[in-house]
Image (cartoon, rainbow, N blue to C red):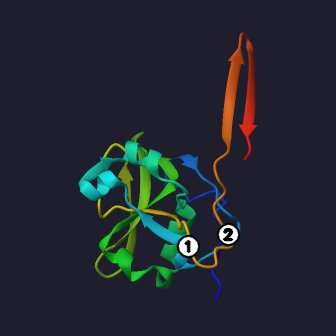
Amino acid sequence: MKHIINLAKKPFCPKDWTVETHIKGDEDFEWNVSKVELFLSEKQKENYQVGVELQKEIINPFNANLLDYLLEHTELIPLEYKDKYVFFWGTIYRHAYGILCVRYLYWLGSQWGRGCHWLDNNFHDISPAAVLASSPKNLSHSLNPLPLVLEIKIGDKVGKYQLIK
């Protein structure tokens, strides 16, 4: 059975929260565990890294739509995730208290659950990011890269330019 996930749709947003940023992926992403890598920064491997710094190092993160799909289809979650808190950095939320956070998937001992971690907290070696694999087998879909927009202001005039590869 194929599992097609819409990574481009608006993500679930808990009550009284807002979506701060959401990196849209493919509308028809076909689930294959070989397309997902668990990324740890060098600082995480050594000890820990603060989330706001870590966020800058994560390339091609999966968004919360994948997290929610996996929670609806727990049979797809790899067993290797059981001893980790797997983060989905493609969607950043503003918690009801005004603090930025990222949602994660974790094993509760008898079932899978979700939580959120504030970006100004530490992320350790058990807190990898789910990212698009760099060389997965049979990769046919990928996340859309973020557009690079350059804004130039000369006097009162402002011009915006999108850089294209």
What residue is at 72 percent from the left and 47 percent from the top?
165
Q: Residue at 64% of width from left, 48% of height from top?
A: 146
Tag count:
2
Amino acid identity at mark 2: His
In-front residue for pair 107/124 = 124
Q: For the residue marked with disc 1, what is the amino acid?
A: Lys
Residue 100 percent coordinates (x, y): 43, 44
Residue 101 on image: x %, y %: 42, 49
For disc 2, the neighbor class at 10 Å (few under 14, some 14 to 19, many from 20) is some
Q: Secondary structure at mark 1?
A: helix
State which quarter of the image contains the N terminus: bottom right
**Residue lying farthest to the left in this orientation:** 47
- Residue 117, placed above or below residue 69: above
Q: Are discs 1 and 2 less than 8 Å apart at CB?
A: yes
Q: Is residue 16 visible?
A: no
Q: Secondary structure at mark 2?
A: loop
Q: Is residue 128 visible?
A: yes
Q: Residue at x 57, y 64 (%)?
A: 65
Task: State how far apart marks 1 and 2 are (Cα).
Answer: 9 Å
Residue 163 % position (x, y): 72, 39
* Viewer-proximal residue among 70 and 90: 90
> Within 10 Å of the Cα at label 1, are there few (<14), some (14-19), or many (20+) other Cα atoms?
many
In the rendered structure, which disc, 1 or 2, sits on the residue that comes first in sequence? 1
Where is residue 81, by image quadrant? bottom left
On the image, the x and y values in percent for residue 108 come to 31, 74
Q: Residue at x 52, y 80 (%)?
A: 73
> In the image, is 155 to the left or to the right of 93?
right
**Farthest-out residue, bottom:** 1
Q: Which mark is residue 141?
A: 2
* Image mark for residue 35: 1
Query: What numbered label is drawn on residue 3?
Result: none
